[in-house]
Amino acid sequence: MVARVSFTVECQGCGALNGSEFGNCMRCGRSLDDAPAGERVRRPFPAPRVQHRAAILGAGTEPLFGRFPAESLPATKAILTLTMLVASAQILTSFARGPSISALFLGGDAVDAIGQGALILVPSLVVEEPWRLISACFVHFGALHLLMNMMGLLHLCRLAEPAVGSVRLVIVYVSTGALGFAATVVYHSLAGKMGTTAGASGALFGVMGLVLGFLLRRKDERWKTWLMQTVAFSVVFGFIVPGVSVNNVAHLGGLATGLLFGLAFAPGAPKPSAIWQRVFATVLALSVLASLLLAHASPLPTMLRDAAL
């Protein structure tokens, strides 16, 4: 099939690419009449789908660590890849004790999840291994739990990452996920409850809060529709994933902190992030890798299995 070709015009104010039929920039509203003739270039039509998605909130151009443009979703892809690797390791660990359909779809038992980084809601254990507040964001209880969260990840982050940039998305995803689990530990400690928890949903609610705060700060009326989608996601998730205790405390904690990040980041996006943001994102990314490695080195799973014998 022969692709159609159209002229695009680069805005001299914000750098967004616009079709030749536009008189003003679709992102910042600046007139395109002052664009030099050399900026009118021939490109395949229609534009890549990611640009259409990014235009919903206003695309950012900031690259991740100076290399990968936000529109290509490098942070989203990295999070997705790492989560799938953890799930694969969880299945392989369970298979090592004996292949089964249950191991394939449930990813083993709770101890297998703890071995990959799941969080045990016992304050003394959290104090001993606090890095589980981060690693638990990448561990799931079964294929359906994983699939639901990764579908949510792709839907949410393909909007959020181009809007605020990859660096800010890394900050929000890891921070809100960890803070959501921290809130869970406090709640269960006060309620005198115990258990094991894991999953990306706290971080995903953080991304929902990010988008909500972004829209609110920019006085975009779509915040009402987005809020309804957030509520619907929470309800549907509770019904679709049977056998998984829905951690509403982590959801609310992630949503609240994500909202604060959205309110804070909206004025600066899609401008390049501050130096402290890039440093913080780098520290968080390294902390994620370190937490997953520490989970594999932890003696806790072995101790739990020995105690069960």
Image (cartoon, rainbow, N blue to C red):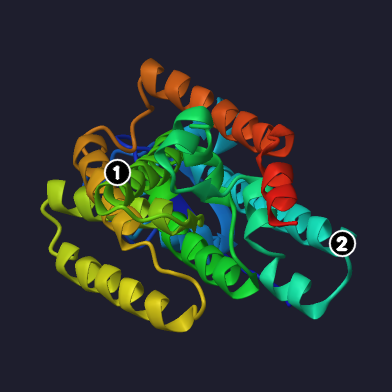
Query: Nearest the camera: 157 or 80?
Result: 80
Relative to 229, say whether 137 is above or below: above
Which residue is labeled 2 in the image?
A: 97
The crowd level at tag 1 (other Cα within 10 Å; few <14, some 14-19, many 20+) is some
Location of residue 225 with respect to 257 vertically, above or below: below
Amino acid type, mark 2: Arg
Q: Position of residue 61 (x, y in %)?
A: 45, 38
Q: Is residue 41 visible?
A: no
Residue 255 locus on image (x, y percent):
27, 53
> Which of the 4 image quadrants contains residue 113?
bottom right
* Residue at image point 46% right, 18% down: 279
The residue located at (46%, 53%) in the rendering is 8
Callout 1 secondary element: helix
- Nearer to us in this view, 156 or 62: 156
* Label 1 sits on residue: 186
Q: Quadrant of residue 156?
A: bottom left
The span from disc 2 to disc 1 (Cα, nearest Å) is 35 Å
Question: Is 196 rendered above or below residue 134?
Answer: below
* Amino acid marked by disc 1: Val
